[in-house]
Image (cartoon, grey):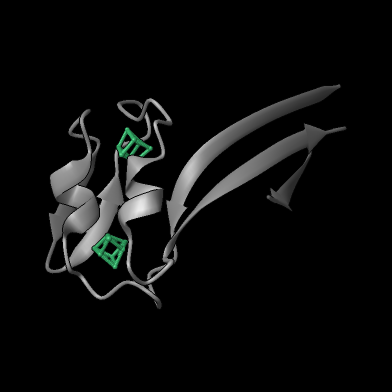
Amino acid sequence: MQISNTEITVMAKKCSGCAYCYLICPSNAINMYYNKIIIEKSLCTMCKKCLYVCPKDAIKISSFVLFNNKDYEVQE
Ligand code: SF4
Ligand code: SF4
């Protein structure tokens, strides 16, 4: 069995809390809580606007592949 999934993730250590991604997201998929970014994955349309606007390169696309019931993360 092989299932793949792609999603936006935030590297918290790189994030400065500038809120640029929060302000640009057209789907209201990004929330801020005490300067921390939380992405509501069910609302994300993968438009990648947050990825391009982040000045700290803190947002990345992660691809997860479930292969034989083991979860692997693939860096793009
Ligand atoms: S990829 Fe687009 S929809 Fe998803 S969190 Fe980023 S800006 Fe919002
Ligand atoms: S744009 Fe980047 S640095 Fe700014 S809040 Fe979003 S993830 Fe953090």
Residue 48 in picture, x, y percent from top left:
41, 39
Q: How many numbered callouts?
A: 0
Looking at the rendering, the quadrant in which ligand 1 lies is top left
Identified at 65% across, 41% down, the residue is 63
Q: Viewed as shown, does residue 75 lie left or right of 11?
A: right
Residue at 71% over, 29% down = 4
Q: Is residue 15 left or right of residue 63?
A: left
Q: Is residue 5 above or below residue 62?
A: above
* Vertical comparison of 9 with 7: above or below: below
51 relative to 40, above or below: below
Return the x and y of residue 12 as percentages of the image width and height: 38, 70
Examine the image and state in which quarter residue 24 appears. Answer: top left
Residue 68 percent coordinates (x, y): 87, 32
Q: Which of 42 and 24 lies nearest the eye of the viewer? A: 24
Camera-side residue: 20 or 38? Answer: 20
64 sits to left or right of 7: right
| Residue found 84% across the figure and 34% down from its top | 67
**Picture quadrant where residue 58 is located:** bottom left
Residue 76 appears at what percent x and percent y? 68, 50
Foreground: 3 or 9?
Answer: 9
Q: Quadrant of the N terminus?
A: top right
User: At 23% across and 44% down in the image, what residue appears?
Assistant: 30
Above or below 74: residue 68: above
For this rendering, which residue is in front, 2 or 11?
Answer: 11
